[in-house]
Image (cartoon, rainbow, N blue to C red):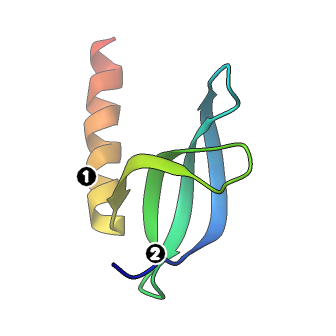
């Protein structure tokens, strides 16, 4: 399997940090030179390792935002 290449283009937010220093981050990332996507995943302190995550297109992010806005109205 070939190496996975990524470039973090924009660090949007750190959502949480574990006791071991891993951070759950919301970033804009280009994977293997492709169109950038919005990404949520855990990163090790040195960024050498990453956890499983989720990537979203701008349209998917808009749908998620709308769903979260509706959820907010219920709380």
| Mark 2 element type | loop
Pick out the residue farthest to the front: 1
Decide if residue 6 is on the left or right side of residue 44: left
Instruction: Give the answer, above or below, for where 69 lies relative to 74.
Output: below
Q: Earlier in the sequence, mark 2 or mark 1?
A: 2
For the residue pair 37 and 48, the one nearer the viewer reads as 48
Instruction: Give the answer, above or below, for where 40 lies relative to 17.
Output: below
| Residue at 38% across, 47% down | 52
For the residue pair 21 and 68, the one nearer the viewer reads as 21
Decide if residue 28 is on the left or right side of residue 55: right
Instruction: Give the answer, above or below, for where 74 lies relative to 28.
Output: above
Q: CA distance from mark 2 to mark 1?
A: 28 Å
Density class for disc 1 (Cα within 10 Å; few <14, some 14-19, many ≥20) is few
Q: Pinpoint residue 45: horizontal percent, then vertical percent.
A: 72, 43
Pick out the residue farthest to the bottom: 33
Density class for disc 2 (Cα within 10 Å; few <14, some 14-19, many ≥20) is few
Residue depth check, mark 2 versus mark 1: number of the one nearer the observer: 2
Badge count:
2
What residue is disc 1 on?
A: 63
Tell me if label 2 and label 1 are in contact, CB under 8 Å. Answer: no
For the residue pair 55 and 73, the one nearer the viewer reads as 55
Q: Pinpoint residue 1: horizontal percent, then vertical percent.
A: 33, 78
Q: Quadrant of the C terminus?
A: top left
| Residue at 66% across, 57% down | 11
Instruction: Give the answer, above or below, for where 73 lies relative to 75.
Output: below
| Residue at 47% across, 46% down | 41
> Quadrant of the rendered structure where residue 25 is?
top right
| Residue at 45% across, 61% down | 38
Q: Pinpoint residue 12: horizontal percent, then vertical percent.
A: 63, 53
What residue is disc 2 on?
A: 4
Pick out the residue farthest to the right: 46
Decide if residue 35 is on the left or right side of residue 13: left
């Amino acid at each position: 399997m070939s190496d996975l290449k990524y470039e973090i283009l924009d660090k949007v937010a750190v959502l949480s940090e574990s006791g071991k220093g891993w951070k759950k981050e919301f970033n804009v990332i280009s994977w293997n030179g492709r169109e950038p996507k919005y990404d949520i995943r855990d990163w090790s302190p040195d960024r050498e390792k990453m956890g499983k995550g989720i990537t979203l297109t701008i349209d998917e992010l808009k749908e998620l935002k709308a769903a979260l806005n509706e959820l907010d109205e219920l709380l």
